[in-house]
Amino acid sequence: MKSRFLKTRLLNKNSSFPNRIIVLTGARQTGKTTLARHCFPSYAYLSIEDPVLRIQYKNLTAAQWHNFYPRAILDEVQKEPVLIESIKSVYDQYEDVYYLLLGSSQLLLLKKVKESLAGRCIIEEIMPLTLPEILTHKWQEDPKFSWYQQFLTTGEIPPFLSSFELYPDYAARMEAFQYYLINGGYPALVNKNMNDGERFEWLKDYVRTYLERDLRDLVELRSLEPFVRIQKITALLTGQLINYSQLGKEAGVTSKTAQRFLQYLEISYQTILLQPWTRNKIKRLIKTPKLHYLDPGVQRAILQKRGDPDGNEYESTVVGEIYKQTKVLHFNGSFYHLRTHDGAETDLLLEKENGFLAFEIKMTEHAGKKEARHL
């Protein structure tokens, strides 16, 4: 079992008042349940997905929660949002209760959380495995910061050897990266007993489950077909600018519907949209965004595609990894893409409190000054 950066944060935050309620959100199969149960093995585990048990939990009074479940993990809590009110009531009446609320839909869950648990909880997001997490060998092993994470946390550029190949773990790093390019970072796939064909079948099942369950948790659609068309078109367009009018035209829906469907993909942790950076913050909201699928395995499964990635897919893979490595640090910054009037482009721009970090991403064996000319 791979270790997670979030493990240390959860254990530290749950040890002191007032963080007696932790809300953990993330896409299905990113490891929320596994992480929670390993961090807090003594907590009762309550699956809200079971409709019969859901009714029982819904009818518990605050006193009964305190007596029967003073410390508990509530999984898929977005399926019964009224339970959040129950947890609020217990929290307000008793000081010795601790709860973890797990959910797959950030819109439904976080809206209710912000309404009911404001000031009473801390919120954490879990995403597919980062490369440092893939490189771990067991749960007890803490993931090591990447060079990028070291720079963000210390402000100092880590020393580089004259050749990356001199690093003792160079082979392991390259193997992990090649694995990630093809399969992505979902924890269930990091199983030595699975081959790439079996991993691909798992990813296709994941995409089907997303449409049948996760999306239905988020919104009721009269027909899935228009959304599926948008999903496939955006998977083809990963790493590219998105024009809502053109996207809607190709999918046979209005531009507003296309924009709404993209919001569903984003709030269900499937994609990220990078707004263009400009000095005028209002213009950032109306200019053309750039879309990236967060996980390369899912993006390729949507397209039923195997083999090596193309340049745009490679860019999305790297952007997604940088995004995840930044998020686990709780770093205060915002991501954009940058395109000048004369066509010069920077693939990724991180705006920090004291400056910027710019990234140029190229799928090439040898990167030189030519590739970095826009930085």
Image (spheres, rainbow, N blue to C red):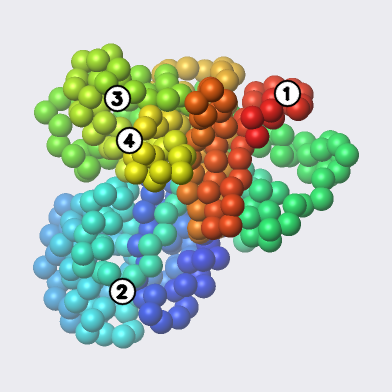
Tell me whether the residue at label 2 lies in contact with that at label 4, contact meaning CB atoms closer than 8 angstroms: no
CA neighbours of label 4 inside 10 A, class few (<14), some (14 to 19), many (20+): few
Return the residue nearer the eye: 122 or 213.
122
The relative height of residue 195 versus residue 74 in the rendered view (above or below) is above
Give me the C-alpha separation between circle 3 and circle 4: 11 Å
Q: Which residue is mark 2?
A: 120
The relative height of residue 143 versus residue 194 in the rendered view (above or below) is below
- Between marks 2 and 4 in the image, the one whose residue lies nearer the viewer: 4
Give me the C-alpha separation between circle 2 and circle 3: 39 Å
The relative height of residue 64 versus residue 109 in the rendered view (above or below) is below
Decide if residue 361 is in sight here: yes
Q: Which residue is mark 4?
A: 286
Q: Which residue is mark 3?
A: 244
Disc 3 is placed on an element classified as helix
Disc 1 is placed on an element classified as loop
Tell me whether the residue at label 1 lies in contact with that at label 4, contact meaning CB atoms closer than 8 angstroms: no
Q: Amino acid at mark 1?
A: Lys
Disc 4 is placed on an element classified as loop
Q: Amino acid at mark 3?
A: Tyr
- Residue 264 coordinates in the image, percent (x, y): 28, 37
Q: Look at 50% across and 53% down and name the residue there.
A: 333
- Residue 159 coordinates in the image, percent (x, y): 82, 50
Q: Which residue is mark 1?
A: 370
